[in-house]
Image (cartoon, rainbow, N blue to C red):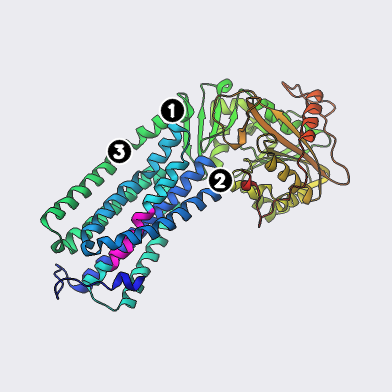
Amino acid sequence: MIDQQVQVSWRGSAPRLPVRPRTGRFLVLAAVFVCAACGLVYELELVALASYLTGDSVTQASVVLSVMVFAMGIGSLLAKRLRSHAAVGFGLIEAALALIGGCSALVLYASFAWMGESRFALVGFSLVIGILIGAEIPLLMTLIQRVDRQDAGGTVADLFAADYVGALVGGLAFPFLLLPALGQLTGALLTGTVNAAAGGALVLWVFRRDLTRRSRWLLIVADVTVIALLAAATVLVDDFERVARRAVYGDQVRVAVQTDVQEVVLTGAGRSSLDLFLDGRLQVSARDEYRYHEALVHPAMNGRHARVLILGGGDGLAAREVLRYPDVRSVTVVELDRGVTRLARTDPALSALNAHAYRDPRLTAVTADAFNWLRKASHGGYDVVISDLPDPGITASTKLYSAEFYGLVTEALAPGGRLVVHAGPPVVRPRTFWTVEASMRAAGLRTRPYRILGRPSGFAAGPDRTTDAAQGRPDWGFVLARPGARPPALHLPPRPPKLRFLSERELARAARYAESRRMRGQVPSTLVHPRYWEEP
C-alpha cells in the first residue's frame, strides 16, 4: 500500500519549485510534524471531553480510537482520487480538518448542554476527523516525492518519523500545556488555527506553481475564512461557556472553576439552594444531602470512633457529620482535588452547609489519591473509614472500588474498626452495587448492605445521583463492613446527635430492601480486571 502511495509519476521532468529540494523537503516534513501534532490533539480532546460529559473514559476512548482508525483507512483510500491534484487537495483537507477539529469541542459541549446527549456527535466527529487525517499521509507522500525524488524507503522513513514525533509533541502538549492553560474549547480552537496556517502556508508557498489561478484563490479564501471563524469563536468562547453553563446548570451559577482534576461548579443563592457539580454531574444538592450524609456516616459511628478517616468527601459534608460527635479526637480527609477543599473552606454557602468543618482543629486535610496515600505510608489504627468517593461507574474511580483497595483499607483499620462505602445505586445499576459488595468480601470484610432514597430532583443526574425511575428519587446504596467472622450490626450509635432523617426504623427498612434485591454470584473487581464499566 505504501509503495502504491509513493510510486507517483508527475508530468514534466523537472520540479517547478520556488525553493531548493532540501529546503522543500524540510518544509514538507515540518508540515507533517505540525499536522500530526494537531491531529493527536483533536483525538485527545474528543476522548477527554466525552469522558468528562459521560464519565466512562474507557468506553469513550475505545469508541474514538476505533472509529478514528477505521476512518483513517477510508480517508487513505479516498485520497487516491486526489493524488493528481495533491497540492490543492492537501490544502483543502487541512482547511476542513482545522475547522472541524477546532470546532469539535464547541459542538460536543453544545450538544450536551442543549440536547443532553453528545454520543452521536462524538462518533460523527471521530469519523470525519479520522477520514481527513487518513487522507493526509498519501497526499504528503506525493508532495514530498514531488520535492525530492528520493527512494521510496527513505521517503516513508522520513515521513513517518516526522509524523510520530509530531504525535508525541501533540500528545504531551494537550495535558501539560493546552488543557491547563487554555481549557478544552480554546485549546481546540487554537489547534485548528495552527493547523490551517501550517497547511495553507506549505501549499501556497512551496507548491504555488502547481496551482491554477482559480485553485490558488480558492485555497486563500478557504484558509482565511477558516482562520477568521476560529478567531471569532475564540473571542466569543467565554460568552459561549457562560450561556452553555446556564443551559446545563440553570441561571444561578455562582462559581465555575477548572481545577487540575475537573470542572467544579456551584449554583444557588445560599446554603439552602446550593448544588455542587463536578464535570457536569450533580454531586451534592442542599435539598437532600443530609439524607445521604446521615446514612453514610452515622451507622459506621456505632462503636469506637476516636480516629476517623474520610476518603474523598472534600466538600466537608461527611466531616460535618463526624465532627458532631464530641468524643471524636481526629478526622483525616484525603481528597484528590485541592480545588474542592479550597471551595469548601472559602465559599460562603458551601462552608455554611458543611458547618465550617475545616475550621475544626480536629480535622486534617490531605491532598492525595486515596489509593496511593494508603499504599505509600503506614496509616493504621483508624476506628472508622468512610469512603465517600465518586461512583464506580466513573472509570477513573474503578481502582478505588477494587478488592486491592479494600485490602489496603482493611490494613488501615484498628481492631474492631468499621468501613462504610458509597457503592452506587442498587436498583438502577444493581450489578455495580453488588460487585462493590463482592469486592469488599474478597478483601476479607464482612458486609451489611443498605439502600436510601434521596428527594426528587429535576436535574438529569450523573451516576452519583442516578434516579430510580419508579420512585423518581436519587437511589443511594451503601455497604457497612468490618473484618472478622460476623458482619457489623446496622444500628445508630447509642447516643447519636439529633438527626433530620435517619432513624433505626429507616435503617431497618433500608437493610431489608437491599437484601431483598441481592444479586448472588458477582465476581469481585480487581485492578487488572475492573468490572464496573461493563454494566449495560
Going from the N terminus, do you reach mark 2 or mark 3 first? 2
> Label 3 sits on what residue type?
Val
Expressed as whole percent of the image width and height from the top left, the position of residue 349 reads 55, 25
Left or right of residue 239, residue 297 in this image: right
- Chain part drawn in magenta: 130-141
Which residue occupies the extreme right position in the image? 485
Residue closer to the observer: 235 or 427: 427
- Above or below — where is 43 with respect to 141? above
Asked whether residue 135 is drawn in magenta, I would say: yes
Q: Residues within 10 Å of mark 3 (few under 14, many from 20)?
A: few
Secondary structure of the residue carrying numbered label 2: loop
Report, in whole angstroms, how far the alpha carbon at label 3 lies from the one at label 1: 19 Å
In the rendered view, tell whether residue 26 sits above or below residue 245. Answer: below
Which disc is residue 246 wearing? 1
Tag 1 or tag 2, which sits nearer the N-term? 2
The secondary structure making up most of the magenta span is helix
Relative placement, left or right, of 458 versus 227 is: right
Tell us which disc is closer to us: 2 or 3.
Answer: 2
